[in-house]
Amino acid sequence: MEILQQHSDTAQVWEEAEEFIRLFHRENPDAGDPRARLAAVRAELADTGTYRHTPRELVHGARVAWRNSNRCIGRLYWNSLRVRDRRGLTEAEDIAGECFEHLREATNGGRVRPTITVFAPDAPDRPGPLIWSEQLVRYAGYGDHHSVTVGDARNAELTDALLRLGWPGGPGTPFDLLPLVVQGVDDKPRWFDTPADAVLEVPIRHPDEGDDWSEWGLRWHAVPAISNMCLEIGGVHYPAAPFNGWYMGTEIGARNLADTDRYNLLPAVARRLGLDTSNDRSLWKDRALVELNRAVLDSFDRAGVTIADHHTESRRFLSHLEREERKGREVGADWSWIVPPISGSATPVFHRTFEDRPSATAYVHHSGAQERARGRDLV
């Protein structure tokens, strides 16, 4: 039975490998005829049950995976993704160190660079390393998940698990940096304090309110580096491959700081602005949401940190569609993720329809990724 399963798995890997290798050679004509490479891959698969991508294949595969990301609106610059090849690393301490270096390089003094760091892949005889943290930078949430008093409610379970695991906790502000949780090959998950010099944070102030907002201590980190998704390229799985683009303002202003199960700041913003919150028909939530998003964009601009607004990014996405169509490639997209969470109908993507088509070369959430991100089974 095990032999039949292994044969089936190898056949599936070969099918996906062949598709990717042919794609790579088609989009990189200087790579030559793919037949010799396909023969080598097939022989390696028969011998080991997997195969190793060349450095060029890895770079192209990581970029194509971004190109295929149906939930990402910012794919226009997919071919500019910087790929850091760290496939030789399997130990938690080494991986954590490279994750922090990833943040430093991607931050680039505020001129954020799309970057991915790829660690060891899964192998037939043992799984690759894992990064439990949802993003390389996360803020603590202190208290019960349903009644968090300080910080990011999304991270309450993870924060509690880390405290029980021995993390001493931060100073107790709403923006305490959480440690990074990494599980090396043949190891249990371990936490590593995030160095202050690896994280650039932007103070959030309103352009009209000035110092009246500074007393809040609002801030957000500059680089959104997703770290618990698996990079899949031609049948090979890289379970630890943190990657980042740059923020779109609504991710911070309309979701991270505004969602009721995150920082839930709309009531406080409305009070600051003197809005009538006694009745939803006053549209106080809408007005507070717009002003919070203005504050985020203005603050990042004043700090010299790369950020996009949802109107510009929507137009860029349509440019991406047109560019891909000219090259004969179909673009998949998830409408519910592509349309911004604020003023959706005022953006051109709202009025388009998309097909959410899957791809074998992509970034995916494997089973248990969200549970790990919340710290379940960490202790």
Image: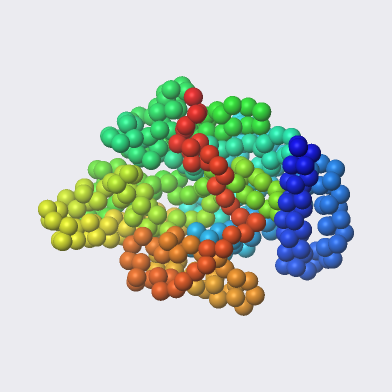
Q: Residue at x 65, y 56 (%)?
A: 360
Q: Quadrant of the N terminus?
A: top right
**On screen, residue 348 above or below 369:** below
**On screen, residue 163 above or below 224:** above
Q: How far across and how far down the image is residue 185, in percent?
A: 66, 32
* Viewer-nearest residue: 379 or 274: 379
**On screen, residue 250 above or below 350:** above
User: In the displayed structure, does residue 261 sit left or right of residue 248?
Assistant: left
Q: How far across and how far down the image is residue 315, in percent?
A: 45, 72
> Splitting the image into 4 quarters, where does residue 263 fall?
top left
Q: Residue furthest bottom?
A: 326
Q: Residue at x 82, y 52 (%)?
A: 41
**On screen, residue 375 above or below 367:** above
User: In the displayed structure, does residue 353 sit left or right of residue 116?
Assistant: left
> Splitting the image into 4 quarters, where does residue 162 fall?
top left
Q: How far across and how far down the image is residue 298, in percent?
A: 34, 59
Residue 242 visible from this viewpoint = no
User: In the displayed structure, does residue 276 sit left or right of residue 261?
Assistant: left
* Viewer-nearest residue: 63 or 83: 63
> Splitting the image into 4 quarters, where does residue 253 fall?
bottom left
**Tag count:** 0
* Viewer-nearest residue: 220 or 70: 70
Q: Residue at x 15, y 61 (%)?
A: 282
Residue 114 visible from this viewpoint = yes
Q: Residue at x 52, y 33 (%)?
A: 181
State how the image is colored.
rainbow
